[in-house]
Image: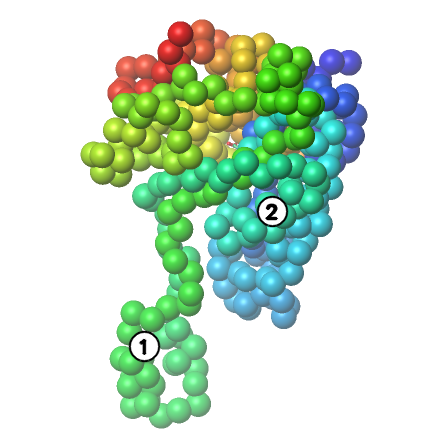
Amino acid sequence: MSTLNQLIVGDCLQILATLENSSVDAVITDPPYFLDKLDSDWDADRVRHMTFGQVIKHLPAGMKLDPEQGRRLYEWYLQVSQQIMRVLKPGGFFFSFSSPRLYHRLTCAVEDAGFLIRDTFLWVYLQNQPKAMSLNHFIMRMPIDPEAKEALKKRLEGWRTPQIKSCYEPIVVAQKSYERTLLDNFIKHGVGLFNTNLRIGINYYPSNILIVDGVEELMDKYFLLDKPSAEEKGDYNHHQTVKPVPLCEYLILLSTQEGATVLDPFVGSGTTAVAAKRLNRNYIGIDINPEYIHIAERRLAEVQASDGRNSSLPSRQPTLLLDD
Ligand SMILES: C[S@@+](CC[C@H](N)C(=O)[O-])C[C@H]1O[C@@H](n2cnc3c(N)ncnc32)[C@H](O)[C@@H]1O
């Protein structure tokens, strides 16, 4: 059975193993970040019940720090990246979202699977929940007299656990080795070069900074993609980490031609597949959770393919443009 334009429920390692060698033009994916036990089986329930020594006890999800997370991410993502290496065409690009904290482990796994690390793009945003916590409730439980407690609280006013408000996500840009030269490879396989006709706003060249919130006039003129609309996500879409469609469109337009096949092995609520369909590319999406696949199917059913020139929301400027 062809997997083209299909969403498949399953563990990506098993499903990837069934895809043909050198059959995919680009991989764009947003894997589990291995923070808070949101790892390869995405078990949010397990996070809530974690109490033993490798995490800070009694903290809600989002604040746990497990020193083994990075190592586990590396070992697992190495296997995922090896499969991606196999299914990508020579010279094909692999874009992987990551977290500022475990980016280094993820990138090493991608590189050790044999990819050339070409760049790191930054998805910059303004809104995020700071994860740091005050230490007051620990102070209150210290065996010291109330005056000393108050003095310590005063001394630590504003000092919190070392977690900053995170305002960007790195996207690793990796490339499978190409055959002979980049030119030979592009002529034969249709991948391996970047489409520099792609513009954001008044920027004369595609760049490695992408934003979807207005930041500041000058930044916006160069780097601001269309803001995702409320409808774009779907009011039925309860996935926790939906990515903006314009961002995926940017990566697709940069690295593939019409008719190409874009794979997302962690497709979640289907953002990459939606972007691919809008731009007349084929998609293959995999997710372990059938509930998310249903959401993705519903989103895809609502998509009209465009001609790939004006992506997401042409009504709003600046927008993604492709020159002739
Ligand atoms: C960060 S989310 C992707 C969100 C997606 N970009 C979107 O916009 O909706 C990661 C996804 O990986 C899935 N996942 C976790 N472990 C997996 C595995 N072993 N195989 C396939 N999918 C997995 C989760 O169910 C989750 O939907």
List x then y, in percent, for residue 277.
Answer: 53, 14
Establish if 93 lies above or below 5: below
Q: Is residue 282 visible?
A: no
Residue 130 in the figure: left or right of residue 90? left
Please tell me whether residue 162 is drawn above or below residue 77 in the rendered image. Answer: below
Q: Nearer the viewer, residue 122 or 65?
A: 122
Residue 127: x %, y % from top left: 33, 44
- The quadrant of the rendered image in which ligand 1 is seen is top right
Residue 188 placement: quadrant: top right
Q: Tag 1 or tag 2, which sits nearer the N-term?
A: 2
Labelled disc at residue 156: 1
Q: Which of these two is toward me, 131 or 141?
A: 131
**In the rendered image, which quarter is residue 152 located in?**
bottom left
- For image coordinates 65% across by 30% down, the residue present is 176
What residue is disc 2 on? 106
Residue at x-position 71% and y-position 50% = 75
User: In this orientation, does residue 64 appear?
Assistant: yes
Mark 2: which secondary structure?
Answer: helix
